[in-house]
Image: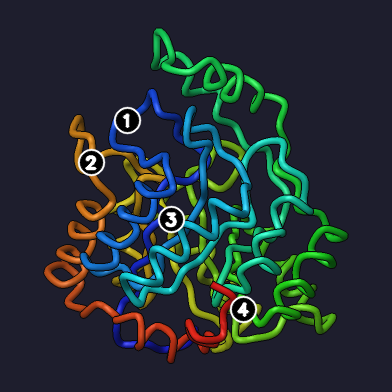
Amino acid sequence: MRDFDKTIISCAVTGAIHTPTMSPHLPVTAEEIAEEAIAAAEAGASIVHIHVRNEETGEPVTDLDLFRQVAETIQANCDAIIQPTTGGGHGMTVEERISVVPELEPEMASCNMGSINFGLYQLLPKFDEFEYEWEEEYLANSRDYVFRNTFEDLETILPTFEGHGTMPELEVYDVGHLYNAKHMVDRGILPTPLHIQFVMGIHGGIAATAKNLNHLVDVADDLFGDDFSFSVIGAGRHEFPLGTQAVHMGGNVRVGLEDNLFLERGQLAESNAELVEKMVRLTREVAGREIATPAETREFLGTKGQSETNI
């Protein structure tokens, strides 16, 4: 694993998992998403991970005008690395998901390294009714949903990243996805060094346990040696325990309302910044590490810088 003495904190601002009924604090409009990203950056996040939503209903969409509006507002108000998603939401095609890369030519974007079942239907019993009609169907349909990222898809997605100077953050939902990444490295399709995001606790992917995180890092070490860095997402209540473990291991961490709606048991987070602030405190007080600035993160990861984007 690559050595870096500071911790990179990413913040995933809204995502495509949670629906408006689940929290009144989930940002929906382009203005809300941008404001939350800027506040998260001020709290200590050097990377802000962006999805966009229908501004009337909160349904996840891949509207390039909204992506541009969000990105331009963030870039005008802070120096965080803007990282749009190419994961999109349920039912989006690969072409729809990847379109934000040639549009914005961002410094980074997420890049999913394999297919999994992606279940959200298990959340249905928690709610008696929903604010918007689409929410219940959206969750229920995930019972029969495969989040598709085939080898052929990756052969399209990865060259698109390289062609626009965008660094992929590799979203790894299970151990086999690391071997997919190694295959693409060996074929010369995926350049190194790699920055890997271990996504843990999604229904259909690897469970969010300390033992599994150790295993993922061990496998990555075997495959990539000192040619990778990593960050961790712990879904839901696992966000802070796994994030703290990752920091202790010399890795990095992602927090945010995409991944977890609660500041602590029974208490909804009122903002993304609250989640970032808590992770900053844990990183310093428990792990004894300092927080990387956007400039330090750019230097470590080797991104091209804001001036080279199309934002």
- Which residue matches tag 2? 269
Crowding around mark 4 (Cα neighbors within 10 Å: few <14, some 14 to 19, many 20+) is few
Q: Sequence-wise, which precedes: disc 1 or disc 2?
A: 1
Are dots 1 and 2 in contact, CB under 8 Å? yes
Residue 180: horizontal and vertical position, in percent?
75, 65
Q: Which residue is at 62% across, 41% downward?
A: 89
Q: Nearer the viewer, mark 3 or mark 4?
A: 3
Residue appearing at x 56%, y 85% in the figure: 308
Q: Secondary structure at mark 2?
A: loop
Q: Earlier in the sequence, mark 3 or mark 4?
A: 4
The picture quadrant where one finds residue 257 is: top left
Q: Please state which amino acid type lies under the numbered disc 3.
A: Ile
Residue mark closest to the camera, 1 vs 3? 1
Disc 1 to disc 3: CB gap under 8 Å: no
Question: Going by the image, does 142 lie left or right of 44?
Answer: right
Q: Residues within 10 Å of mark 1 (few under 14, many from 20)?
A: some
**Callout 4 amino acid:** Asp
Q: Is residue 265 left or right of residue 136?
A: left
In this view, the residue in front, 215 or 177, is 177
- N-terminal of the pair, mark 1 or mark 3, is 1
Q: Residue at x 65, y 86 (%)?
A: 192
Residue at mark 3:
233
Frontmost of labels 4 and 1 is: 1
Which residue is label 4 attached to? 222
- Would residue 23 appear left or right of 259 to someone viewing this image? left
CB under 8 Å between callouts 2 and 3?
no
Q: Outermost residue, left direction?
A: 285
| 291 relative position to 180: left or right | left
